[in-house]
Amino acid sequence: EPEVTQTPSHQVTQMGQEVILRCVPISNHLYFYWYRQILGQKVEFLVSFYNNEISEKSEIFDDQFSVERPDGSNFTLKIRSTKLEDSAMYFCASSEDFSGRKYEQYFGPGTRLTVT
Amino acid sequence: AQSVTQLGSHVSVSEGALVLLRCNYSSSVPPYLFWYVQYPNQGLQLLLKYTTGATLVKGINGFEAEFKKSETSFHLTKPSAHMSDAAEYFCAVSTADKLIFGTGTRLQVFP
């Protein structure tokens, strides 16, 4: 069964460093998302992406964050200058592009980001 | 604005007992509702979803949920709990471009 994959599974970085989290969505999906989950808290929406553009973003997704689809398979989340509070599990998700199924999002296993 | 409320951050049941996890939603448009499960140190797995049609939806692992518009609820049930059901369960409502999750309910199953 097709699945969303994410790399790395765990990333440790120092405060102020840039990190790039990578995702490979399901191949025929056209909508892509990033969510995060701070330890012990609920899953929060960061950004959605369609047709090479951000379609919606949350208040969390400030200028320190960016997303990109650099090629036909990868979808990346970049944090330019990490802060301690960016420590969280980051989930990538994707969904198909037609009504009725657009809203079913498939999640990757997550990348645990630890900022020290 | 759409939102989801999950009543009870922790639910404990004995193996073989009924599982009931509560979810209420707020939505100005007909909602698309989901239940996801998260096992320890893993990602989110879709259990079941309601979009349109039959209000009682069946999912994986013997779970089901009933959409009740009059009560704005989408509670998750399973007739007989199994030890392997121990996990975190998240209810979510979909807008056009994102899922809004509840705070989650941790299910513990005792032998």
Image (cartoon, coloured by chain):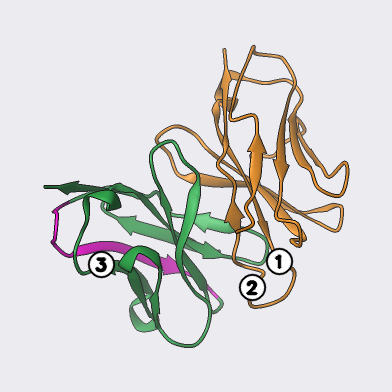
Chain colours: A orange, B green
Chain letter behind tag 2: A
Q: Name the disc covering residue B78, or none.
A: 3
Is A95 in front, or is B52? Answer: A95
Q: Name the disc covering residue A101, or none.
A: 2
Category of crowding for the residue at label 3, using alpha-carbon neighbours closer than 10 angstroms: few (below 14), some (14–19), many (at least 20): some
Residue at image x 87%, y 41%? A70
Q: Name the disc covering residue A27, or none.
A: none
Give residue A104's quadrant in the image.
bottom right
Give residue A89's quadrant in the image.
top right
Q: How many discs appear?
A: 3
Q: Is residue A49 above or below residue A19?
A: below
CB under 8 Å between callouts 1 and 2?
yes
Residue at image x 70%, y 55%? A26
Q: Amino acid at mark 3?
A: Lys
State the quadrant of the N terminus of chain B: bottom right
Chain letter behind tag 1: A
Q: Can residue A59 be seen from the camera position used here? A: no
Callouts 3 and 1 on one subunit: no
Residue that lies at the very extreme toward the front in this rendered image: A1
Q: Is residue B75 above or below residue A99?
A: above
Residue segment shown in magenta: B13-28
Q: Position of residue A58 (x, y in %)?
A: 66, 47
**What residue is disc 1 on?**
A96
Question: Label 3, label 1: how many angstroms apart (C-alpha)?
Answer: 29 Å
Question: Label 1, label 2: how many angstroms apart (C-alpha)?
Answer: 6 Å
Question: Label 2, label 3: how many angstroms apart (C-alpha)?
Answer: 25 Å
Magenta segment: does it hold B27? Answer: yes
Q: Position of residue A27 (x, y in %)?
A: 75, 57
Is B84 in front, or is B63? Answer: B84
Q: Position of residue B77 (x, y in %)?
A: 27, 68
Chain letter behind tag 3: B
